[in-house]
Amino acid sequence: MSAQALVNAEKGTSLWADAWVRLKKNKLALFGLGVVLFLIVIALLTPWIAPYGYEEQNLELGATPPSAAHWLGTDLFGRDLLTRLMYGGRVSLAVGLIATSVALLIGVAWGTIAGYVGGRTDAIMMRIVDALYALPFIIFIILLMVVFGRSLLLLFLAIGAVEWLTMARIVRGQVLTIRNQEYVEAARAMGLSTPRILLRHVVPNSLGPIIVYATLTVPQVMLLEAFLSFLGLGIQPPQSSWGLLISYGAEVMEDYPWLLIFPGLALSITLFALNFLGDGLRDALDPKASKD
Amino acid sequence: MFAAPLRRFFSILFVCFALSGCGQGESNVESGNRQQILHFSNGTEIQGLDPHVITGIAEHHVVQTLFEGLVVKDSQTLELEPAAAASWTISDDGRIYTFTMRDDARWSNGDPVTAYDFEWSWWRALQPSLGSQYVFTYFPIKNAEAYFKQEISDFSKVGIKALDEKTFRVELNNPTPYFLQLLDHYSTFPVHKATVEKYGKPDESYTRWTRPSNIVTNGPFLMKSWRLNKRLIVEKNPDYWGAENVRLNQIVFHPIDSEIVEERMFRAGQLHWTDQVAIDRAPWYRENAPERMRIKPYVGTYIYRINNKLPHLSDSRVRKALAMTVDRQTLMDTVLNNIFTPSYAITPPGLLGYQPPKTFGYDPNQARALLAEAGYPNGEGFPEMELQYNTSDQHRKIATAIQQMWNKELGIKVRLQNKDWKVYLDDEATGNFEVSRGGWIGDYVDPNTFLDMWVGGSGLNRTGWNDPRYDELILKTAPQAKTREERFAAFREAETLMMNDMPFIPIYTYSSHHFVHPSLKGMHVNVMNYHNFRDVYLDPNWDKKEQASGQGE
Amino acid sequence: MLRYTLLRLLQAIPVLFAVITATFFLIRQAPGGPFDAEKPVIPAVKRALEAKYNLDLPVWQQYTQYLGDLFKGDMGPSFKYPGWDVHDLILSGLPTTAELALYALLVALVIGVLAGVFASLKPNTAQDYIPMSLAMIGICMPTFLLGPLLVLMFGFWLEWLPVTGWGDLPGDKILPSITLGAAYAAYIARLTRGGMLEIMSQDYIRTARAKGLPEWVVVTKHALRGGLIPTIAFLGPAFAGLLAGSFVVETIFQIPGLGRFYVQAAFNRDYTMILGTTIFLSTLIIIFNLLSDLLATWLNPKLRSQFRGGAV
């Protein structure tokens, strides 16, 4: 990193402005951004634009393949799959967003401090991470549900509270390499305060792996939500999520394949889009990569 | 520096997979048919082997192959046949049973099975510190309940007595028509005194005496091996008194929790018998391999318990309105794929000729009228209600459909809540529910097993419903009835009275539903879904006799 | 380095102690007890059972008693399978689960590292997009879907491999290993690619290239060392995840492993079994996190210096 970059970093704003300029050049990333925005808009508008009610059943109709009346077919209860996908998307996108943000916030803060400060602080913080890893997760969730009652927000927070552990380990590993880099030493030599060094130099320079892992966390939390809901610890019918739709679809994939294919597609497209966006962001934020 | 480790990973991986080889060998069913080895899916893993301690259907399957009580049921007619007892007599007042022991019954270590074994075993089962959960099986016996509750301490006052090696005498409180039936329940099986005492105190549960290497048994099969969560194998007992009629050489019990996994294993020829039918696969089998799916009536009823103590559910008109808007027939035809049959009372039809009353039907109009009378026209003012069920795919589907029926027909909003088994039990037992899924499977073939649980103070009632007249009919009138007609009339009056008050909502009558390989013979059909593995065999030539089908594979 | 390792092992003791204590008190807060059943248990029977397992004592006394027994190496009998001791059950499930997790990790490492390195060599080309898209699909694909799909394909349509089992029929270990490893392969591919791209833009790589070294030497000799650090930091948690997360795969393929005991124990309120498996798994997690930290340090020369000072 050059002195100029250090000065830029100190100015603070230019990193993000530069990143935006670079991101705009990355077509795939823009495409990903477009898809994600589109899905968010759909999710927000769902109550007004969904073709049917999400709990509206037609038992006699049962599971039917796609047709003019039901573009993506119907499920075992004769409910419109498109409608259920739209409503399920609201839950899945929300859990992806909220739980990942929670994991990101705690994980990055924890990992950065542990890695940068080092010594006894690092040892204690990372041993706490080890201990939390080891606690029986299902019991933990059952207890949360019993003590605080069942609410979606709590479920999201609980998932986020579990997912930050790995994030913390990864960030710490990254920070360990960064803190001995010349530019950090230079910043230290310039007499900058620790929080300032962390926020201006350490965190921005470990953003690459953080973003990559964050995009990996989104599908993970969506599937974790499905697993918990499946075990009876998550959301309740007739509400649904993409993960749950997929797990129900997996059970009947031989008889009613569309019940698996469409939810699977929805989840995959979202994750691809997020991923393109994540990669684009990573490249855009990485000042070194930009010089090549 | 990384090329070498990478190469090593690759070669390890390759060797691992190469060693395990590829391709499918002979299936369990093929090899089993050749060697008379039955591959039986037992649902869940069993908790243990001590007949006086265990509970559950899976446990029953295994323990019944290893031990033998005084009598055994014929698996076709459910009539009682001699087992460890060669014969018995009943006194004229119906209170004293005298059993004569079989001469050639042996424990697996060679000891004879005597009346003293039964006397000791039943004494053991009545020890409170043993913790037998089926101890009430003994309560028809004179002073047994008092002894168990430690109101008397002298066992000789209990009506259980070995007169000599060959004669076993049992005295009852009252003539109990179904008493003999109880004697083929595992809680009355004998255990081997010397073995039990070798590994612990007699009244101590779960000592090492039931370990596969230690256990001594008296049944048609012997314990061979047990690997938890994988398989439990029993093999034919050559010294069993009826050994010449036992045709299976081995039974392999597979513990499989998921009916979807069961179906896959069955389709791949790994199982002769599944514990359940995967409901969503039923239409496929009906179309393509109907002979491999067996669905028969079973003595059980699926219900929704209502918490009668809550203000909005204390009015029987509300409860009836809920019951009348469950469209059972449509539910069976669609979501449940006609595996079960609709039910409108607690007893299943045709138990020993007893027919339950039908006091109501599917009638949304009358239901709306009733709800309006109760002060909730079109559901207005009725609070949002929670329907709880323990986590299971099938319970979820039924609840999802019924939630919508109540909402559509009555305007009542219902919130579904699945709970893990222990939370569900806890909430139901403490009355922390509004509507809760439930079910009951008869312990014996008699309407009483479905009716006595609803009397006041019964631990299985849990609805808060109570009616003195009902209690009188069940606890006094019926037991003292002289004839079956009188007894059934009392039952019918009681059940009609209860269903008019609707403390719970009957949904459907259970069925036993299994995938069955056509080579499996002797698993007779009966309402208890009771099987005696002594009668079971495998026909290796099944496909030569019935050339018709084979598409199921 | 040795000193650091010993220090970490010493630190593991309070960690384990904290885990045991937290778990012990947590599970007793969950509603329902180990002996609750559908038929209400006769009070005298319930008292007898509770007395047998010391559940009638005050909780803190149960706790000290448990710790005392544990110190003597006795984890007590399982409540759900009362004829068996917890350590019997763990020992019966462990070899299977460890084998499964190991194969799955191998699958994940081989596929993941290769795909990640391959993709990072020509970023933003087809060589990058194709393996990364496959990796994305691997991540989206939950085990409860991938398992049955593979069974359907290789078990029923092609009839190449058995549909269930572990060590019963030839080839029955392949599908479970792939099912469990696939998601991790995908993560490792992504992390490897990210790490490699980071390193490939470093000055010392440019120096190596400028020296005219062939590209494969640059990659294997210089870049992989640093590029794999995020991956290796991930391996500890990954192995822990494989061990604890084998439940679904064990259920789908009827494998008698630890994962099923672990999850069933939680639902059965099998207190001793929950504690036993937790102690066991947390020990493994601590060890594997330590190993992956050591490996990451060894790969990163800049970090090694800190251990000489012993400042940890």
Image: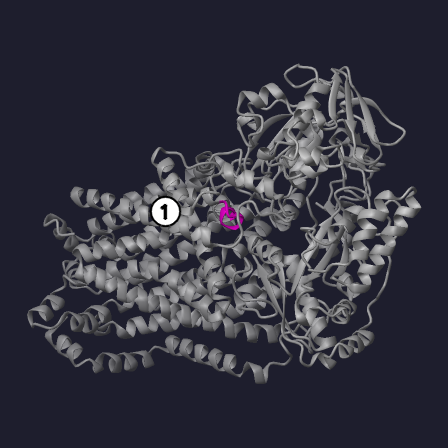
Quadrant for residue A113, please give it. bottom left
The location of residue B456, given as percent across then percent down, is 72, 54
Q: Chain of mark 1?
A: C
Across and down, in percent, residue B223 comes to 62, 26
Question: Which residues, given as a range, are shown in magenta?
Answer: C264-270
Answer above or below: position of C195 versus C158.
below
Residue at the disc numbered 1: C20
Residue at x-position 86% and y-position 60%? B358
Amino acid beneath label 1: Ile
Q: Is residue C179 above or below residue C45?
A: below
Q: Main secondary structure of the magenta part?
A: helix
Q: Tell me if B300 is positioned left or right of C60 in this view.
A: right
Q: Residue at x 27, y 78 (%)?
A: A19
User: On the picture, is A251 further left or further right than A138?
Assistant: right
Q: Position of residue B552 (x, y in %)?
A: 73, 47
Location of the C terminus of chain B (image quadrant): top right
Residue C35 drawn at (x, y percent): 56, 45
Label 1, secondary structure: give it.
helix
The residue at the point 53 percent across, 83 percent down is: A45
| Lateral position of residue B254 relative to residue B536, left or right | left
